[in-house]
Amino acid sequence: MNIVPIEDSRGFRYIPPVNVDDEAEIGQGTFLGPFTQVASGARIGRQCTLGQGCMVLRGAVIGDHVKIQFGVAVWNGVTLENGVFVAQGTTFVNDNTPRSLEPKGGKFVQTLVKEGATLGAGCRIGAVTIGRYAVVGMGAVVTRNVKDFSLVVGAPARHVAWVCKRNHGEQRFAHLVFETSGVGCCPTCGQGYQMKDGLVTEL
């Protein structure tokens, strides 16, 4: 069955039913899957894709060209920069000390996922910063900041490799190769990188 999305007057498309508050900000060309909820005070950029059953709460910020697969809740205090990919089953934690009888009153921890990062299926993301083009492996539990271009796996998540920013259409991310001078490259596309003081940057 071919379901044609409905064009909202605000410029985004959706497949009903969805629940979008009037004061939610949603950019041009963004697509919302069925049963998606977007609260007042939430901000979603241009050309994003949110799969079925996603929830974006007040105070959440989503940049442009972000892809979020089905069933993910983006809570208050979570910021996803441009080009972030969030796989199904990802969980963001915005409260490190929850108590049912002692609500926080809107005081939640902050989570920042920087440009181009990838969050694998079923991972758990705490009050951390995920670096540019970093990759969090499937099922990882992230309790510490992740550096740019770092691949982390496991529970708790640990660094295992540096990866290229590009997707080369292969079954795994290309691991960067560095010389003793700190200069390196992607063996697949040749993109250059520099490692200095434990940090990786593009050349």
Image (cartoon, rainbow, N blue to C red):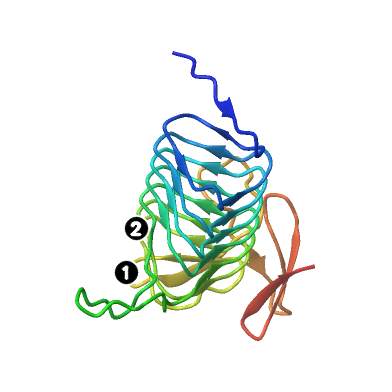
- Front position in the image: 201 or 27: 27
Quadrant for the C terminus in the image: bottom right
Q: Residues within 10 Å of mark 2 (few under 14, many from 20)?
A: many
Which residue sits furthest front?
22
The kind of residue on which mark 1 rests is Ala
Marks 2 & 1, CB-CB < 8 Å contact: yes
Residue 190 falls in image quadrant: bottom right
Query: Any mark on residue 139, and which?
Result: 2
Element assignment for label 1: loop
Residue annotated with mark 1: 155
Element assignment for label 2: loop
> Left or right: 194 with respect to 21?
right
Residue 143 falls in image quadrant: bottom left
Q: Residues within 10 Å of mark 1 (few under 14, many from 20)?
A: few
- Front position in the image: 105 or 79: 105
Q: Position of residue 13 (x, y in %)?
A: 59, 33
> Left or right: 45 with respect to 113?
right
Q: Is residue 7 above or below residue 194?
A: above
Q: Is residue 27 above or below residue 180?
A: above
Could you give the CA–CA distance between mark 2 and mark 1, rounded to whole angstroms?
8 Å
- Front position in the image: 42 or 125: 42
The kind of residue on which mark 2 rests is Gly
Q: Is residue 16 above or below residue 88?
A: above
